Image (cartoon, rainbow, N blue to C red):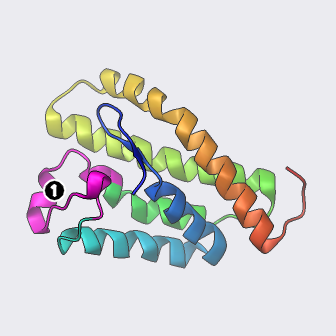
Amino acid sequence: MVAVPMVPAPMTLQTLALILVGGLAGARAGGLAGVLFLAAVLAGAPVLSGGTSAAGASFLDLGTAGFVIAFIPGGTLAGLANGRFRHDAAVFLGAHLLILVAGFAWLFAQKGLPLAEGASSLALLLPGALAKSGLAAVVTRALLGGGDAP
């Protein structure tokens, strides 16, 4: 697993994979990918950042649980891509933002930290979200074709 250590949450390529599933296979598949990832986590599979695991209810105690739960609507949203580069890049960025905002809201509520601190932490992950969204748009356009140039 590729992860860039950041505080309070690492940047991984998990969201890129999720968004590619949605972008390539549609909203239902994107949401299902989120459900399957959550099920793997709950079953104790070592699929969290750093290869860690947290089976069952212990997962909900993690500050990062909100990110994983948000994979379901994030993957669904990514499925609204339509093979047009500019539209897809915006949809994928929206999916990333949904995951990041929900994840940070959960994290900061779980840790009792002020949400204002979450905004600055969120800002640190935006360049990665932008890059992954753009890459996902390029990949989906290359694999599915599309109407407008990048």
Q: In the rendered image, which residue does mark 1 sit on?
A: 60
Q: Is residue 56 above or below residue 51?
A: below
Give the image location of residue 65, x and y in percent.
25, 53
Q: Which residue occupies 71% across, 56% down?
A: 137
Q: Are there few (<14), some (14-19), or many (20+) residues within 10 Å of tag 1?
A: some
**Looking at this view, is 14 or 109 the one in front?**
14
Asked whether the viewer can see residue 79, the reply is no
Q: Is residue 58 magenta?
A: yes
Q: Quadrant of residue 146?
A: bottom right
Give the image location of residue 147, x and y in percent.
90, 63
Disc 1 marks a residue whose amino acid type is Leu
For the residue labelled by badge 1, is the local secondary structure a helix, a strand or a loop?
Answer: helix
Per the rendered image, the range of residues in magenta is 47-67
Give the image location of residue 36, x and y in percent.
36, 76
Locate residue 24 relative to residue 41 in the image: left or right.
Answer: right
Asked whether the viewer can see residue 17, the reply is yes
